[in-house]
Amino acid sequence: MLDDADDIHPLFHGAPRTTEFKKLRKRILRQTREAVEQYGMVSATARDADGARDKWLVCLSGGKDSYTLLAVLYELKWRGLLPVDLLACNLDQGQPGFPATVLPEFLERMQVPHRIEYQDTYSIVVDKVPQGRTFCALCSRLRRGNLYRVAREEGCTAVVLGHHRDDILETFFMNLFHGGRLATMPPKLVNEEGDLFVLRPLAHVAEADCEKFSKAMQYPIIPCDLCGSQDGLQRQQVKQILDGWEARSPGRRQVMFRALTNARPSHLLDPKLFDFTGLALGSVKSDENSEDVPDLR
C-alpha cells in the first residue's frame, strides 16, 4: 500500500505499516470499488451538461463508518478509479454536548473540502416524539431532507452515505420481523424528487472492518448519544440476534448478505414479481434444485 506521507492524501498520514492493516485497507478498497462498479454508481461520463465533473456530497457524522467512507473514496480518487469531485458535509443537529469543533478542525487539517451545516433538528425530534419512543425515524427524515437541500445548493449529483454490509443486513431483518416485507437499504437509489442519487459505497464492507480501520487511523470518533442511549431499539435487538448466529457459525453474516444478491422471484411468493398464474406445463424449465435446503449440520 501507500506508506510515504508525501505520496498520499493527508487522510492516510500516519497509517500503520503492519501487514494486518495493509490487508485490511486493501480489502476495504477492493470491496468499495466492487460496489461502485457493480451498482453503476459512477455515470458513464461522470460529467454534467457543462462538462464539469459530477460532485458527491459525502455525509460525515463523525462515526467510524463515515470516516472509513471518506478515506476510501479519497484513495479511489487518488488511484484514478473515481472520476468525481467530493464535498464532505456534516449536519450539526443541535444535539446538546455535540463537540461542534471536532469535525471542522479535522477536515481543515486533512485538507478536505467541506461544508458544516447547522440545523436544530434535535429540538424538533424531542418535542414531537412521545416519551419512551425512539427518535430514529423522525431524526433520519429531518437529516435526510437537510442533506438533500445542501446537495442541491452545492450542485451535487449524489448524496453518499456510510451504511455498510451489517447495516443493510440488519435493515433486511427489521423489515422481515417488523415490517412484513423483504426489503433493505439499496446500494443505489433515486430520491423521491428524482433529482439526486443516494449511494452506499460501503455496501459490501463489514462493520468490524470499519471499526478496525478508523481505530487504527485514530480518527476522532464522535458517538451518537441521541438514539444510541435509548434501550430496546429494534435495530439493537436484531444486531444481538445476528451476533449470536455469527458467534455460533462464523461467516454466517456474509452468507446471509450474499443471499440478498441472489434472489429468485420464482421461488418466493410475490405474484407482482413472478407470473405464477401464467406458468404452464412445458412453458419454462423449473430449477427444482433451488428448492433444496443446504445441509448445515
Image (cartoon, rainbow, N blue to C red):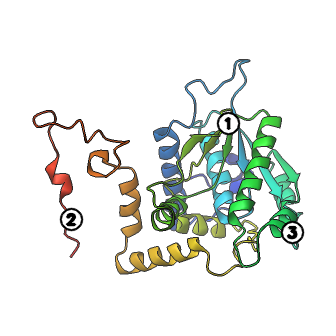
The answer to whether residue 12 is left or right of residue 226 is left
Point out the image quarter for the C terminus: bottom left
Q: What residue sits right under mark 1 in the picture?
A: 196
Helix, strand or loop status at disc 3: loop
Q: Residues within 10 Å of mark 2 (few under 14, many from 20)?
A: few
Q: Position of residue 32 (x, y in %)?
A: 53, 49
The span from disc 3 to disc 1 (Cα, nearest Å) is 30 Å
Q: What residue sits right under mark 2 in the picture?
A: 294
What number is the disc on residue 66?
A: none
- Counting residues from the start of the chain, the first of labels 2 and 1 encountered is 1
The answer to whether residue 30 is left or right of residue 114 is left
Which quarter of the figure has residue 162?
bottom right
Amino acid of disc 3: Pro
217 or 179, which lies in front?
A: 179
Amino acid of disc 2: Pro
Image height check: is 241 above or below 135? below
The span from disc 2 to disc 1 (Cα, nearest Å) is 41 Å
Q: Position of residue 58 (x, y in %)?
A: 71, 47
Image height check: is 165 above or below 97? above
Q: What residue sits right under mark 3 in the picture?
A: 99
Amino acid of disc 1: Leu
